[in-house]
Amino acid sequence: MRNSDKDRLILALAAQLRAERQTREALAAVIGNGQLDREVLLAILEDPIPASQADGAQQGVTHRDLLRADALAAESHRPRARAAWRCH
């Protein structure tokens, strides 16, 4: 069964959430190990673990779906976009 656009968007957002959690876990591990070196912390924050297409490939998530999820997430930070999102 082929997933709808909405289903693929949800799966792409879930893949991004997993990647964010992995980045947060890596950051916590570095801090927990006492590696508070500024360069290490900046490297983790500036180059987070990316959501990969492989995370959702079995469910039909494409790179395009991940880009769409990124765009939606970026829009949700703007006040006007948030108001429009609530209206739908």
Image (tube, rainbow, N blue to C red):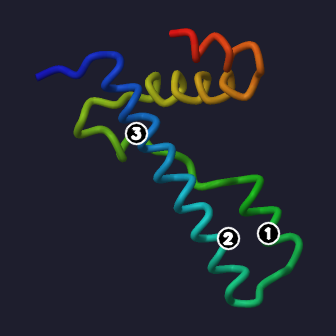
Q: Nearer the viewer, residue 52 or 85?
A: 85
Please give the count of numbered marks on the rendered protein: 3
Tell me: 43 left or right of 54. Answer: right
Q: Quadrant of residue 30?
A: bottom right
What residue is shown at x 34% (from left), y 26% (from top)? 8
Label 3 neighbour load within 10 Å: few <14, some 14-19, many 20+: some
What residue is shown at x 41% (from left), y 26% (from top)? 9
Mark 1 vs mark 3, CA separation in Å: 26 Å
Q: Are marks 3 and 2 in contact (CB under 8 Å)?
A: no
Q: Position of residue 86 (x, y in %)?
A: 58, 17
Label 1 neighbour load within 10 Å: few <14, some 14-19, many 20+: some
Image quarter (top left, top right, bottom left or bottom right) of the N terminus: top left
Q: Give the farthest residue toward the front.
A: 87
Mark 1, residue position: 41
Q: Are marks 2 and 1 in contact (CB under 8 Å)?
A: yes
Q: Amino acid at mark 3?
A: Gln
The image shows residue 4, relative to residue 61, as above or below, that is above
Marked residue nearer the N-terminal end (2 or 1): 2
Nearer the observer: mark 3 or 2; the answer is: 2
Q: Position of residue 33 (x, y in %)?
A: 69, 89
What residue is shown at x 29% (from left), y 38% (from top)? 57
Mark 2, residue position: 27
Marked residue nearer the N-terminal end (1 or 3): 1
Label 2 neighbour load within 10 Å: few <14, some 14-19, many 20+: many
Mark 3, residue position: 53
Q: Are marks 1 and 3 in contact (CB under 8 Å)?
A: no
Q: Quadrant of residue 61?
A: top left
Nearer the observer: mark 1 or 3; the answer is: 1
What residue is shown at x 73% (from left), y 28% (from top)? 77
Q: Amino acid at mark 1?
A: Leu
Marked residue nearer the N-terminal end (3 or 2): 2
Mark 3 vs mark 2, CA separation in Å: 23 Å
